[in-house]
Amino acid sequence: MLVALCAAGVTVLIDVRDGRLPAIVHWGPELPGLDATEAETLAGAAEPVPGSNNLEPVPRPSVLPEHHLGWTGRPGIRGSYAGSGWSPFFTATGVRLNGEPVDGFAASGPGVLEVTAADGDRLGVTVLIELLPTGLLRTRATLTNHAADIYQLDDLVLALPIAAEAAELLDFGGRHNLERRPQRSALTTGTHLRENRKGRTGADSAYVLHAGTPRFGFAGGSIWAVHTAWSGNHTHYAERVFTGEQHLGGGELLLPGEVRLATGDSYDSPWLYGSFGTGLDEVARRFHRHLRAREPRVTADRPVTLNVWEAVYFEHDLDRLLDLAERAAAAGIERYVLDDGWFGARRDDHAGLGDWVVSPEVWPRGLHPLIDRVRELGMRFGLWFEPEMVNPDSDLARAHPEWIMAAREEWPVESRHQQVLNLGIPGAYEHVKAQILAILDEYDIGYVKWDHNRDLIEAGTRTDGGRPGVHEQTLAFYRLLDEIRAAHPGLEIESCSSGGARVDLGVLERADRIWVSDNIDPHDRQSMLRWTTQLIPPEFMGSHIAAGASHTTGRRHDLSFRAATAVFGHLGVEWDLAQATEAELHELSEWIAFFKEHRGNLLDGDLVRMDTADEDILVHGVVSRDREHALFALVALDSVAPDPPARLRLRGLDPARRYRIRPQLAGAARSAPSHGSGAGFGNAPAWWGADGQGVTLSGAALEHAGLAFPRIRPDQAVLCRLDAKEELA
Ligand code: GLA
């Protein structure tokens, strides 16, 4: 049996012949005219030729590669019945495409292939391979133990084959305050392995692992990429074996003894997503379209949000917070989020975590006086929680020390003075759920910032001999989000984890926004926003304007650069507005008005990132889906080099239409002269025109001929607006 799936310019041809698990023959550009004969011919013609001393035939590994076929790379399943049954030999028992049994050749547009298979009467497996309407491929497996003995599963990974020309890798590293730093390397024989044992996605997660033709960029190169949609321990890997075959794979990383299947028990792997595209923008766009099709939808009219954290930290003073609310509303802000410090004994980060009861000491009348005023001012209200965490100095830890995750009698090493609440223990789970629901029932809260501020180290269940519990914890976290959302339909959730350490497609099935980083310095944010969009679209990225002097780096930046950086995500403000001058407040309100005018495109259009000759010059923008409007940012992170700079080119426009391109001056830059030196730039290019009206040029000319690049000073940005004028004759 051969099955072809085709969607959004991608074809996947899957070989399910000879009772084997599904193996991918082709995953890449669309293959027109792929009928039964062509599929059969291709599947045969693409079979590798054995070299000297090779197995014959050379094994074509399935998406769950099996050792018994002669595959010596990483197997899909590792586990055993106390040492026996360690090399499963699966025989397919059923093949269904979109629910219908397959016989011979079957084809579909977007669709899902389901293959069930058995290893004798011991193990059963169901493998799903789905091509989504966006052209995104995803696969997962469910393993079931039918034997009387316990089967210990040590590892289950899925793997997607990639072309031999994909010789260069791109994935990510990073740390707190500097998330998602891109790193490139060669794909050579062996394994590029990214393992995560942090119990959360991680600031240094591989995020999206790409393999592409050498020097692939935003616009060019054939690129295959994978993402493991899981918020607990996980792996991503790229593997090249001696026969030259290459894979990208991933799955959950299981701790020793974490998954032991008794008779009838099953293990569900997370989804492994695959995106193929020409250039990184196309790879990212498939992920974006997928998240944009998610229910409930995140819409482009999201409210501009104020978060009070960098304004007040733990100093919860009602008058000060009310004053902040007045100033926020006056500036045009539409949602007010109260951060850490409102509950229990949480006056700093040493105590109170885990006690989700409003502090009567700080809030004698509860949160009502604040929330009532916020609502009167026409803003929505949001509240911070960190439900999976506990300070040892808390009522919860004193009452239930056994609810804290630990692999031994002693508690694990502390991080930010906190330990982890074991959500795998039903009592602990119900306790925290009840406390959160009580707050949500009492107050008018439409938004929760859900934080998670430490790695899970030695995360076991003390009451069960210290058995590892990260797998259960991750599932319980998902269940808790699902149950809270079900109890409060319409509640929005922001996924925060020491900034941006929990960003993945698992959590984003249930969260509507992620906090990119605790570092709001726009110089660093330019890169973090740019690369965070490799997986998620702008409207999911919390993107704030903070104080002029960054609380993280100490660097100072003009409001125009802070704002021109932040408007390419879901805009927020995180700044003590009582410290802002009247001029700054006025400029801020202008930027907020600008964002509201453009958010329909900024948070809905297609993202474009240009490849530039100078890595300190960034050009990125958003083009509306109908190609009518676009907004681009030209950013200098350092002095422009070379001199003169390369031309400004813009992609993603309709080549057969003419556009007016003009500088879009907002905030202080509005008053800058269009020629000569002004805020943020030196000499303006002639194409700005004396009146800032710009010029009209075709999309093709803008992409291929380009314009003179404006002289931009370091750490400044200029926005350009494009509006379609006419079709070319
Ligand atoms: C984490 C978050 C911050 C803030 C603090 C509160 O660091 O990333 O945004 O909420 O916790 O303690």
Image (tube, rainbow, N blue to C red):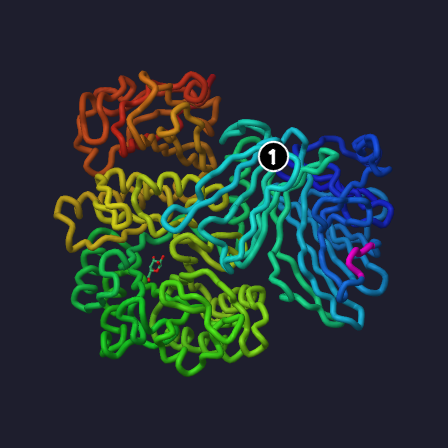
Q: Quadrant of residue 4?
A: top right
Q: Decide whether residue 89 is among the magenta residues.
A: yes
Q: x, y percentage for residue 663?
A: 28, 28
Residue at screen point 46% across, 72% down: 411
Most extreme residue toward the left, as rendered?
Answer: 582
Q: Quadrant of residue 253?
A: bottom right
Q: x, y percentage for residue 469?
A: 56, 68
Between 547 and 6, the one lying in front of the other is 547
- The reply to whether residue 267 is in sight is yes
For the stretch drawn in magenta, the main secondary structure is loop
6 is higher (above) or lower (below) than 651 = below
Mark 1 near ligand 1 (CB under 8 Å)? no
At label 1, counting other C-alpha atoms closer than 10 Å, the crowd grade (few under 14, some 14-19, many 20 or more) is: many
Ligand 1 lies in which image quarter? bottom left
The three-letter code of the residue at mark 1 reads: Leu
Q: x, y percentage for residue 568?
A: 36, 41
Residue bounds of the magenta highlight: 85-90
659 is higher (above) or lower (below) than 17 = above
Q: Is residue 699 toward the left or the right of residue 313 in the image?
A: right
- The reply to whether residue 107 is in sight is no
Q: Which residue is mark 1?
A: 187
Between 308 and 497, the one lying in front of the other is 497
Residue at screen point 69% across, 56% down: 141
Q: Decide whether residue 258 is among the magenta residues.
A: no
Most extreme residue toward the bottom, as rendered?
Answer: 399
* Quadrant of image for the N terminus: top right
Residue at screen point 87% across, 46% down: 18
Q: x, y percentage for residue 177?
A: 36, 49
